[in-house]
């Protein structure tokens, strides 16, 4: 290890002269503006007299490619409030508007590779959480909830996406955006109803706020509140946002009823059986205060949710499948505690989905979430029905979560109580499992943070080693990202409403990551050498898994990127296990592999990315490649062909595990789309098709038509089903 660290730091020497100049100074600010009349939301900012009366906010400063330089194109930005709305008007001047790039017009599609504009509001000024909105020149709607400044957990799967990555992209608010393209470039108008946000009422409040503009022709990223160089710095870093002062808003009424009706036809080809289902249910949303919301749900259904990507388990530990159901994803960060993706004390996917992936009927439940003063409050209770077919009893799931944020800091302290009960009926309790936890974050200025949690579980018959904890420290500044962590899980720790990647371990881990900008005249943009490691031991201190990763990322200004890495692994297998037809026997295995990643410019009509590994594996050899070829035609049609191939050879036995996928999307408008995801897994002989048509009225409401094909050729399962679902959801604003 010592020699590895010496080699790593020698890599930096030729490039240290190009370290960035710290551009962070006093954060920009402005006073909120109030208008009596709303602007017409049509995208025409330049010719609207309302906007002419509102002062502009600026300028914008580059982070990429020329950090600290003014943006290459002018951006005229304005913001104003009425008693019911927050309005954003922006003119993105462009010297060559014919080069504007729109890669996807579907709601919540990635804006990184488009000519786009985004903004984030930290309505409580807690420097940790926010609401993110964005659009491109086609008027696409992009919104997300940001938790923990968008920083995810560093697990074996690297940084997680989705909600566990600190970015809840499945949060959908009710708002409007319109755009216009002209010889000047393009412009956009946002109308955000205040009832779609959470904030503290009263006079002279301060909101954190920042704005971002992406210019695709030069791969440029610029911000209103400039950000330093570093891998973890983005608009989500609300502790570095600017300030909007003198925000004085009153309580907006918010009471919504969201009923749905569903009809479903399922054809069981193997059983020559046809099943019809007609169902309905409803959600109720009431804002007790602008900061505290009550959600009630009855006969909850998630037929329109995206399907999981198939995976093949090439090890002896649990696979992680992210939550994709809208009800559980809203305000999910408020209930998160533990180490997401590794030691999740609450994992909502355990509700309504059995261990084999079957759907368990959800009778209903409720959720209270929001803020009381500086304290985040989350209460959740859900009841799933008994099922004779699945041999399951009635389950009641409950979560209590509080988290207090300290003023003018990135610090907090919290506690959680999570559990479930199992019963034949409401009057007879058969089993219960509970988890208790306390956690906290100490923000040391803007540069460093110490965080951790301690937890114990209560399970009938288990009284020893029922603990789990994690402590971490990280430093993110001046192009450095450094962290150290230690986590531990006892063999008696059973979070039955949570997720454990593996149980019974001690794990230290670390990362040293440096981003180095090359001189402005070079075609190479930056160089990112880093080293990381994670080391698992059993509770007696014996090695289970060690992993050391040495890598260098090379990024060009053209958008082309190459990663060259080397991984060193050690595995101690205490019990025989199988990977499909391969048997891994007990013993010590020393493995090493080369890693090669290639990415082309994703803003182009045709792009390609691949991640390849070559090396030894459990006494044999493994060649892995995860590749994707992406094509788009304008802003309407896009397709991605993916393949995850693993060729493993151990003691003469061979496993070729291949998961292939085809994703097709056609966007008629930003609110009407047709999407199909086709997958084939040769290990389980599983072929699946998920085709979804969506005609959206508002946030995640409207008409959904979903067609599923599932064909499993496995001798044991022999599944051959076809299903079509028609679901309509409507939102009634009862206080409009």
Image (spheres, rainbow, N blue to C red):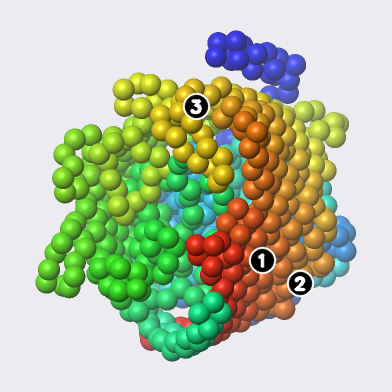
Residue ID for mark 2: 636
Kindly indicate the quadrant of the structure image that contains residue 666.
bottom right
Dot 1, crowdedness within 10 Å: few (<14), some or many (≥20)?
Answer: some
For the C terminus, which image quadrant? bottom left
The Cα atoms of the two marked residues, 3 and 2, are separated by 47 Å
Q: Is residue 486 above or below residue 146?
A: above
Tell me the element at label 3.
strand
User: Which of pointers 3 and 2 lies earlier in the amino acid sequence?
Assistant: 3
Confirm whether residue 715 shows in the render. Answer: yes
In the rendered image, residue 323, in percent from the top left (x then y), is placed at 46, 59
Kindly indicate the quadrant of the structure image that contains residue 286.
bottom left
Residue at the outermost left position: 427
Dot 2, crowdedness within 10 Å: few (<14), some or many (≥20)?
Answer: some
Task: Choose mark 3 or mark 2, whichever is in front.
Answer: 3
654 vs 541, nearest the viewer: 654
The Cα atoms of the two marked residues, 1 and 3, are separated by 35 Å
Confirm whether residue 472 shows in the render. Answer: no
Q: In this view, does 674 lie above or below 553?
A: below
Task: Choose mark 1 or mark 3, whichever is in front.
Answer: 3
- Residue at left 38%, top 21%? 542
- Residue at left 33%, top 34%? 504
| Left or right placement of residue 710 versus residue 390 in this view | right
Disc number at residue 571?
3
Residue ID for mark 1: 678
| Left or right placement of residue 625 versus residue 438 in this view | right
């Amino acid at each position: 290890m010592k020699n590895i660290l010496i080699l790593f730091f020698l890599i930096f020497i030729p490039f240290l002269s190009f370290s960035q100049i710290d551009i962070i100074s006093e954060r920009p600010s402005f006073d909120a503006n109030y208008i009596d009349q709303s602007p017409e939301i049509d995208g025409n900012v330049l010719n609207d007299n309302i906007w002419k009366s509102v002062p502009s906010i600026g300028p914008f400063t580059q982070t990429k490619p020329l950090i600290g330089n003014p943006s290459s194109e002018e951006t005229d930005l304005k913001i104003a409030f009425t008693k019911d709305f927050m309005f954003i008007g922006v003119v993105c001047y462009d010297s060559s508007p014919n080069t504007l790039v729109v890669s996807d017009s579907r709601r919540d599609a990635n804006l990184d590779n488009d000519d786009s504009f985004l903004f984030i509001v930290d309505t409580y000024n807690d420097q940790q959480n926010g609401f993110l909105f964005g659009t491109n020149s086609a008027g696409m709607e992009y919104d997300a909830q940001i938790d923990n400044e968008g920083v995810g957990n560093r697990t074996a799967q690297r940084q997680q996406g989705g909600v566990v990555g600190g970015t809840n992209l499945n949060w959908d608010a009710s708002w409007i955006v319109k755009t216009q393209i002209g010889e000047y470039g393009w412009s956009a108008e946002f109308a955000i109803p205040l009832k779609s946000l959470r904030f503290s009422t009263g006079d002279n409040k301060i909101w954190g706020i920042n704005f971002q503009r992406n210019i695709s022709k030069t791969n440029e990223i610029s911000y209103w509140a400039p950000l330093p160089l570093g891998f973890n710095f983005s608009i989500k870093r609300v502790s570095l946002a600017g300030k909007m002062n003198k925000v004085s808003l009153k309580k907006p009424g918010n009471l919504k009823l969201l009923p749905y009706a569903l009809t479903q036809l399922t054809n069981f080809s193997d059983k020559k059986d046809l099943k019809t289902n007609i169902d309905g249910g409803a959600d109720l949303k009431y804002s007790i205060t602008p900061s505290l919301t009550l959600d009630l749900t009855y006969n909850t259904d998630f037929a329109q949710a995206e399907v999981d990507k198939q995976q093949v388990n090439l090890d002896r530990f649990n696979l992680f499948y992210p939550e994709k159901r809208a009800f559980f994803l809203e305000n999910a960060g408020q209930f998160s505690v533990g180490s997401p993706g590794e030691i999740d004390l609450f994992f909502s996917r355990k509700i309504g989905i059995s261990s084999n992936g079957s759907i368990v009927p959800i009778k209903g439940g409720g959720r209270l979430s929001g803020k009381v003063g500086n304290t985040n409050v989350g209460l959740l209770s859900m009841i799933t029905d008994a099922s004779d077919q699945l041999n399951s009893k009635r389950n009641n799931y409950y979560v209590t979560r509080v988290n207090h944020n300290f003023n003018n800091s990135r610090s907090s302290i919290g506690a959680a109580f999570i559990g479930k009960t199992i019963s034949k009926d409401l009057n007879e309790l058969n089993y219960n499992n509970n988890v208790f936890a306390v956690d906290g974050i100490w923000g040391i200025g803007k540069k460093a943070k110490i965080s951790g949690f301690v937890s114990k579980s209560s399970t009938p018959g288990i009284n020893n080693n029922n603990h789990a904890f994690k402590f971490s420290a990280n430093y993110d500044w001046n192009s450095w990202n450094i962290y150290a962590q230690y986590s531990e899980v006892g063999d008696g720790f059973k979070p039955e409403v949570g997720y454990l990647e593996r149980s019974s371990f001690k794990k230290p881990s670390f990362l040293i990551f440096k981003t180095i900008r090359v001189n402005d005249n070079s075609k190479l943009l930056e160089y990112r050498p880093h080293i990381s490691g994670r080391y698992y031991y059993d509770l007696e201190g014996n090695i289970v898994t060690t992993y050391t990763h040495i890598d260098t990322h090379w990024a060009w200004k053209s958008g082309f990127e190459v990663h060259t890495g080397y991984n060193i692994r050690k595995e101690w297998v205490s019990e025989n296990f199988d990977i499909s037809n391969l048997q891994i026997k007990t013993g010590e295995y020393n493995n090493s592999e080369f890693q090669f990643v290639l990415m082309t410019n994703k803003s182009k009509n045709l792009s390609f990315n691949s991640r390849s590994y070559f090396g030894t594996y459990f006494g044999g050899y493994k060649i892995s490649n995860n590749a994707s070829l992406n094509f788009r035609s304008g802003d309407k049609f896009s397709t991605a062909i993916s393949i995850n191939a693993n060729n493993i050879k151990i003691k003469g036995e061979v496993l070729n595990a291949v998961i292939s996928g085809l994703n097709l999307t056609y966007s008629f408008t930003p609110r009407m789309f047709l999407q199909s995801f086709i997958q084939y897994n040769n290990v389980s002989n599983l072929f699946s098709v998920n085709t979804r048509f969506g005609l959206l009225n508002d946030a995640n409401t409207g008409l959904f038509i979903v067609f599923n094909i599932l064909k499993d050729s496995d001798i044991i399962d022999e599944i051959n089903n076809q299903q079509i679902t028609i679901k309509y959801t409507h939102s009634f604003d009862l206080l409009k």
